[in-house]
Image (cartoon, rainbow, N blue to C red):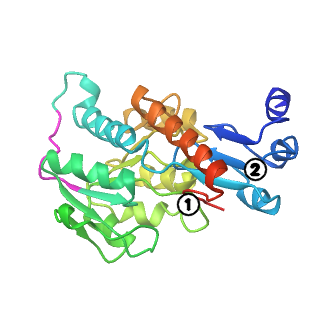
């Protein structure tokens, strides 16, 4: 923390990835005018306090979308093929795939899922994202998140973390899923209610959970459920050379534009 405070003391602008930018960091940077998160999620930044200090906070939506979408499909394939153990697996073709959050990542996941011949479903009525684009008419829009859970064997979580999404994937929704349900979380760990997940997996030995964000009690869950739960050692959805370059370049360009025109881009506060 002290190194970060020292690094930002003269900064007018900040590009951040996974660093937590709280009040102490913001107070350590008296000249700060803008913070850009090189990525989509910005819950690691105290956006409210930044606004109080007249500091603009932006994100760079879409720059990591393909990298995250490819990771999601990679997890799906690895799971379907029993992590290449040699045991008989299943195919993705024809399976029902629900996408929670149809932004840049969700839209790209849908395109890849369509390439695999999966049946695609989403729910856009929450007001978080725009409707399905005409060219993605192969995606069916359901009436609710509950309908997604009731319909789809495969479910991908790509929602931002906020008061509405925190803990939204819990026991009751998981128990509504079809047989051999597979939940893939490439978003934030807090979107899943861990107690509810454990209870559902206890009662439903067919449920599988794959995550790019390890549950807080992952070691205990892994010991209990074995191959039915998998988490990457470190969040790596956006960790590709291309995504790092795209997000970093976009962040730098947005900062340059802000100081040139005074107008923010993708402001989140």
Across and down, in percent, residue 141 comes to 27, 71
Q: Secondary structure at mark 1?
A: loop
- Residue 38 seen in the figure: no
Segment tinted magenta in the rendering: 89-96
Left/right placement of residue 24 relative to residue 46 reads: right
**Residue picked out by circle 1:** 167
Left/right placement of residue 62 relative to residue 58 reads: left
Residue 33 numbered tag: 2
Q: What residue appears at the point 50 percent right and 36 percent down from the top-left corner?
A: 249
Across and down, in percent, residue 192 comes to 52, 54
Which quarter of the rendered picture does the C terminus lie within? bottom right
Q: What residue appears at the point 35 percent right and 36 percent down from the top-left corner?
A: 71
Residue 150's place in the image compared with 6, above or below, is below
Q: Quadrant of residue 240?
A: top left
Q: Secondary structure at mark 2?
A: loop
Q: What residue appears at the point 53 percent right and 38 percent down from the top-left corner?
A: 214
Across and down, in percent, residue 28 comes to 87, 40
Q: Nearer the viewer, residue 91 or 14?
A: 14
Between label 2 and label 1, give the one nearer the viewer.
2
Bin the neighbour count of mark 2 within 10 Å (Cα to Cα): few under 14, some 14-19, many 20 and up: some
Q: Nearer the viewer, residue 117 or 227?
A: 117
Bin the neighbour count of mark 1 within 10 Å (Cα to Cα): few under 14, some 14-19, many 20 and up: some
Of labels 2 and 1, earlier in sequence is 2
* Residue 51 part of the magenta segment: no
Residue 70's place in the image compared with 86, above or below, is below
Q: What residue appears at the point 64 percent right and 39 percent down from the top-left corner?
A: 15
């Amino acid at each position: 923390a002290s190194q970060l405070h020292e690094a930002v003391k003269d900064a007018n602008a900040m590009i951040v990835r996974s660093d937590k930018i709280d009040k102490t960091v913001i107070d350590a940077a008296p000249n700060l005018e803008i913070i850009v998160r090189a990525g989509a999620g910005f819950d690691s930044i105290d956006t409210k306090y930044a606004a109080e200090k007249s500091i603009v906070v932006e994100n760079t939506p879409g720059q990591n979308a393909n990298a995250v979408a490819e990771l999601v499909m990679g997890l799906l394939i690895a799971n379907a093929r029993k992590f290449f153990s040699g045991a008989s697996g299943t195919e993705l073709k024809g399976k029902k795939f629900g996408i929670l959050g149809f932004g840049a990542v969700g839209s790209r996941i849908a395109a890849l899922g369509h390439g695999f011949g999966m049946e695609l479903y989403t729910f856009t009525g929450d007001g978080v994202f725009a409707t399905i684009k005409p060219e993605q008419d192969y995606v069916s829009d359901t009436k609710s998140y509950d309908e997604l859970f009731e319909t789809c064997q495969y479910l991908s979580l790509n929602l931002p973390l906020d008061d509405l999404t925190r803990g939204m994937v819990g026991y009751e929704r998981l128990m509504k899923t079809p047989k051999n349900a597979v939940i893939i979380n490439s978003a934030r760990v807090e979107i899943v209610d861990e107690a509810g997940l454990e209870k559902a997996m206890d009662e439903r030995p067919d449920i599988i959970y794959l995550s790019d964000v390890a549950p807080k009690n992952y070691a205990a869950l892994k010991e209990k459920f074995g191959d039915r739960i998998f988490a990457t050692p470190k969040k790596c959805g956006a960790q590709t050379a291309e995504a790092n370059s795209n997000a970093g370049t976009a962040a730098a360009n947005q900062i340059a534009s802000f100081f040139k025109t005074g107008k923010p881009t993708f402001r989140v506060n």
